[in-house]
Image (cartoon, coloured by chain):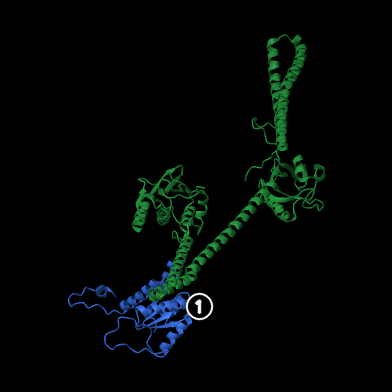
Chain colours: A green, B blue
Amino acid sequence: MENPTDVTSNPPANGRALPSPAQSAGLVALVYASVGIVWILLSDWLLAILIPAAEYYALVQSWKGSAFVLVTAVLLFFLLRHQYTRRTRRTEELREVNQRLNLHVENTPLALVEWDKGLRVTRWSPQAEEIFGWSAAEVMGRDWRHDDDWQFVVGEDRSQVGQIVDRSRAENTTGSFSLNRNYRKDGSIIWCEWYNSWVFDGEGEVVSMMSLVHDVTAEREAVEEVRRLNRDLEGRVHRRTAELAQANADMTALNYSISHDLRAPVRAVLGFGQIMERRHAHAFPEEARTHLGHILRAGEQMDALIDGLLEYGRLEATRGPRPSTDARSVALEVAREVEAALPEAKGAIEVSGSLPALPMDRTDLRRVLHNLVGNAVKYREPGRPMVIRVSGGTDSGVARLRVEDNGPGIPEEHRDRLFRLFERMHRADEVPGAGVGLAVVRRSMELVGGHVVIGDSHLGGAAFELTFPLNGSTTQ
Amino acid sequence: MTRVTAMGAGSPPSWPRRVLLVEDSELDLQLTLDAFGEVLPQTRVDTARSGEEALEQLGQEIEAGGELPDLVLLDLKLPGIPGSEVLREVRAEARTRRVPVVIFSSSREESDRAECYDSGANGYLVKPRNWDGFLGVVRSAGEFWLQWNAPPPWVPPGDVAPSRWARDDGGAP
C-alpha cells in the first residue's frame, strides 16, 4: 500500500518538519522553568556570599525579584520571537508553494475538480468551466450520481465510471483513471480522461477526491479518422486486388481461348490449303495457284499473330529473389543465333567488352535482345554492310543497355506507336512479322520497373535505350 | 459397331489395326483422317465426336466381348465430358485400363500436359499448325504404338545383365 498523498499540504521539499504547537510551547515552558529554578537556587547563595551585612538584605531581595522578572521577560521575548519567526516563515513558504501549484493548475489545459467524501463538487476550476460549459456556481455541491437535473456522465458510461471510483475507494488505492464520455452544458458529448486521487487527512481518512480532467475529444476523433481511413484504404486495396486477380484470370482465360479457338480455323486453312497445294495445285490454272498462295501466306501470318499474342499474354513479373543476369553472355548467344539464322545478311553484330549485370530473368532478357537484334537485322539497309552494336553500363542507380544499328532509323513520329501491340512500320507482305516484338520488349521492361526509348544512333540508324533500376525502385 | 477381323495370323502388324479418334471439330477430324490415309493407310480409324460417344463405344465393345482399339487419340476440349474426364474413366475401368491413350490437344500449356500425364495419359501431342504437322502427328502415333507393342528384344543367353529386381528379391520381405 502506498502512502496516502495530500496534494495541498505537502511539506516544502527544502524544510525539516515543523514541531507541533505543544512541542513549541513545552520548549518555552521548559526553558522558563529551568531559568527560574537556577535563578532561585543561585541568586540566594550568591547574595549570601556577596552581601554579608543583613541590614541591606531585604532591600537587595526586592531588587533581585524585579531583576528576575526582567530577565525572564527578556528570555520569553527571545523564545517567543524565535518560535513565531519559524512559524511565519513556514506559512509564507507554504503560501508560495500553494500559489505556484494553483498557477500551474490554472495554466494547464487540464480541468481541476474536487469532490467531497459524498462526491459532491467542492472545487471547479476555470478550465472545468471552459471544458464542460457549467460555471463553478452552477455545479457546486452537486452530485452527478444522484442529481437527476445534472446530466454529466453519458448514460452508457455511468455505471462504468461509478464502478471505477467505488472500487478504488473500496480497495483503498490512492486514485483511479477512467476514460469516458461526458456531456457539456450545451448537450454535446466530449471524451475525457479522468485522473482521480483521493485526499487523506492525517489519520488516513478520506477527505475528498481530486480529479484532473483532460479533454481528448479531438485526439479520439483524429484517431478514429485515421482508423476509418485505414479501413477505407484496406477496403480499396482489397477491391483493387480482387479486380486485378479477376483481370489476370480473364487474361489467362483469353489466352487459353486464343490458343484453342482462334488456332482451330487457322489450322484448317493451312491444313486443307496445303493438301490442296500438294495434291491439286499442278492442275490449277495459274491464277488459282496465286490465290492459294495468298490464302496460305495469310494463314501463316495469322498463326504468327496468335503466337505473338500468346507470348505477350504470358509475360509476367518474376517472383522470388531479384535475378541478376550477365548481359554480355546473353548478348553473345543472341548474336550467334541471329547470325546463324540469317547467313545471307552481310555485316557484324558487335557486343561491347563490358556489359552490366541486369535485374532481369535470363529468358526474358534473351527474348528482349532477340527481338531488338532481330529487328535490326530484319530492317537493315540493303545497300550497305550491316552494323549492329550492343553496349551498356551503369550510372547512378540504373543500368543501361543500348542496341543500335546503321539501318534506316525510325522517324520521330513512329517511335511511341511502335511499342504498341500489332503496330508495325511496314506492311506484312514487305517485311514479315506480327507487330508483337517491341510490345514484348516494352512489357518486359515495365515488369522489371525499367523502361525503353528509341533514339538516333551515331551509326546512322536507330538506337534502343533500355534502362533498368538497380535499387529495386522504378526508373520512371 | 463393326467387328474387327484379325489381320494376318502370323507376325503381328507393324501398325495399329484400329485407332479411336475422339475429336469434335469437323475440320480437325478430316485433316487427321486424311493424314492417317496418307501415313497409315491400313489402320482403321473409328471416330467419336464427344466424350460421351467415346465412352459409349468403348462400353459397347466391352459388352460385346470385342477387341478394344489399339490406340485412343483423345482431344481435351470436347462438348460435354472433357477429354481429361474421359481419360480418367478409361483408366478407372479395369478392362480399358491398358488401352494406350494419347492426348491430341491444341493446348501448349505445361499445366494441361502435366495434368494429363498425372491422369495416366501415355502421350501428349500438340495439334499442329499445318498439314505437314498432321502428317508428323500420325507418324508419331504409329511409332508410339509400335514401341508400345514391341516384343522384348532378344538377348543372347549368358549376356543377361543382372536384374535390379532379382537382386532386390533377396533382401525384400
Residue A275 appears in the rendering: no
Quadrant in the picture for residue B138: bottom left
Residue A217 in the image: above or below residue A99: below
Task: Name the residue located 82 percent from the left edge and 42 percent from the top edge.
Answer: A137
**Which residue is the site of mark 1?**
B79
Residue A226 in the image: above or below residue A432: above
Q: Which chain does tag 1 point to?
A: B
Task: Name the residue located 31 percent from the left edge and 78 percent from the top edge.
Answer: B146
Residue A41 is situated, as x and y percent measured from the top left of the image, at: 69, 19
Quadrant location of the C terminus of chain B in the rendered image: bottom left
Residue at disc 1, secondary structure: loop
Task: Name the residue located 77 percent from the left edge and 47 percent from the top edge.
Answer: A120
The outermost residue toward the left is B158
Residue A53 appears in the rendering: yes
Residue A115 is situated, as x and y percent measured from the top left of the image, at: 75, 45
- Could you tell whether A33 is left or right of B8 in the image? right
Q: Mark 1 is on which residue type?
A: Pro
Residue A145 is situated, as x and y percent measured from the top left of the image, at: 77, 52
